Image (cartoon, rainbow, N blue to C red):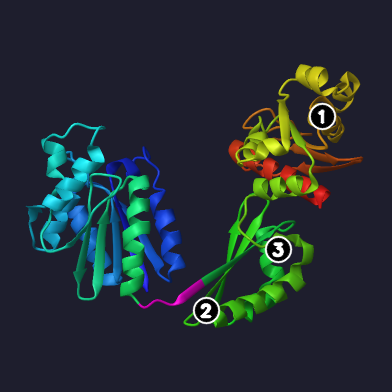
Amino acid sequence: MFAEIITIGDELLIGQVVDTNSAWIGQKLNKIGIEVLRIVSIRDREDEILEAIDNAMKRVNIVLVTGGLGPTKDDITKQTLCKYFHTRLVFSEEVFENIKRVLAGKIPMNALNKGQAMVPEGCTVINNPVGSASVSWFERNDRVLVSMPGVPQEMKVVMTESILPKLHEKFQTDVIMHQTFLVQHYPESVLAEKLELWETALPESIKLAYLPKLGIIRLRLTGRGQDKKEVRALLDSEKAKLEKILGEDIFCEEDTPLEVIIGELLKKKKITVSTAESCTGGSIAARLTSIAGSSEYFNGSIVAYSNEVKMNLLYVSPETLERHGAVSEETVIEMVKGAMKALKTDCAVATSGIAGPGGGTPEKPVGTVWIAAGYKNEIRTYKQETNRGRSMNIERAGNNALLILRDLLK
């Protein structure tokens, strides 16, 4: 069973608003056996909306539309849907009562708000429990089109409470199950070569996807069928084969962020961590502290961009900096030791490098980053040398630092 998502709004196309709705909808549909065939973003223009809807209704059984349901003149989705389905807008007392309830004590009622109680005649109208824009559910020739608000919080509520259950009830869908593996130590092409024989022999109902992520590759196995137990058994069989091929290079069997994995290890061992960061500018600390409850194991960070800070706060010796430079294995080793000492932690990571776009030399080109992780009396280092641009260099360094720390803690 296939679906198409249409997002409406000029703001999406000029980059003023990022479309997070489609990713969320795709995940939820997949869980009930509905596969998204296409995602289309279009402007608030009647002819473009009509064309997108008509094309989608010819391709798939389920069309989900978000956006263009507000009270202002640029929101034309309802009127355009009326034109497509040859109907008209009529006033709904039930929707109006819901609007009054939602706006009570927050926003004064005016003609524009009241106008949102005008709904397409002949469709199934679903009230929005957290907003004033109602949902319109159309059916034609065993096909369904659902028009929802574009505000993410509102869309998620109406999808979860009303639309997903109705879709699941109406359509007989296959079982779709995923198994994700996080793999380290491989470039994508090398990993694909290593897995070629196994991948070629996969059953027709099992598909493999490679999802690279700056130092990490996510392998996603997707199984499809009509019987949940059979699909699960097939996935488990292929999982065992993959584990035999890759061994400990698989460091997680869920699509879990590295900072979560590290946090769980730290809590399990009841130890603390700190970071000493130069080129990563505190981004590793930000990732670690983005997890609820991280105060249990995260003590602090020293962002040591200058050599003075490295010397004064992290106890890096002037001789080390003079002899080897800030971007060196010797410096990050002393930074790790200094972080554990200054912030009184059991383990730490450190980074020092040239993120770019300038600052490189023939000996140390842009993209060179030295990384260290220390735990107890052991320190491991790694030299990162790939230049993918400043933001990617920083993100890759953060991933590599956390991967080294994970290996130490394991």
Q: Look at the image and give the residue range highlighted in magenta.
A: 172-176
**Amino acid tagged 2:** Lys
Helix, strand or loop at mark 1: loop
Which SS does the magenta portion mostly show? loop
Q: Seen in the image, is 249 located left or right of residue 63?
A: right
Q: Nearer the viewer, residue 308 or 113?
A: 113
**Amino acid tagged 3:** Val
Q: Residue at x 60, y 41 (%)?
A: 292
* One can see residue 277 in this view: no
Q: Residue at x 33, y 68 (%)?
A: 167
Mark 1 or mark 3: which comes first in sequence? 3
Res 39 → quadrant: bottom left
Q: Is residue 95 above or below residue 37?
A: above
Picture quarter with the N terminus:
bottom left
Frontmost of labels 1 and 3 is 1
Residue 91 in percent (x, y) is at 8, 51
Res 326 → quadrant: top right
Label 2 – label 1 distance at C-alpha = 50 Å
Label 2 – label 3 distance at C-alpha = 33 Å
* Mark 2, residue position: 228
Label 1 – label 3 distance at C-alpha = 41 Å
Frontmost of labels 2 and 3 is 2
Numbered tag placed on residue 359 in the rendering: none
Helix, strand or loop at mark 2: helix
Mark 2 or mark 1: which comes first in sequence? 2
* Mark 1, residue position: 344
Q: Nearer the viewer, residue 367 or 311?
A: 311
* Mark 3, residue position: 190
Instruction: Verify CB contact (< 8 Å) between mark 2 and mark 1.
Output: no
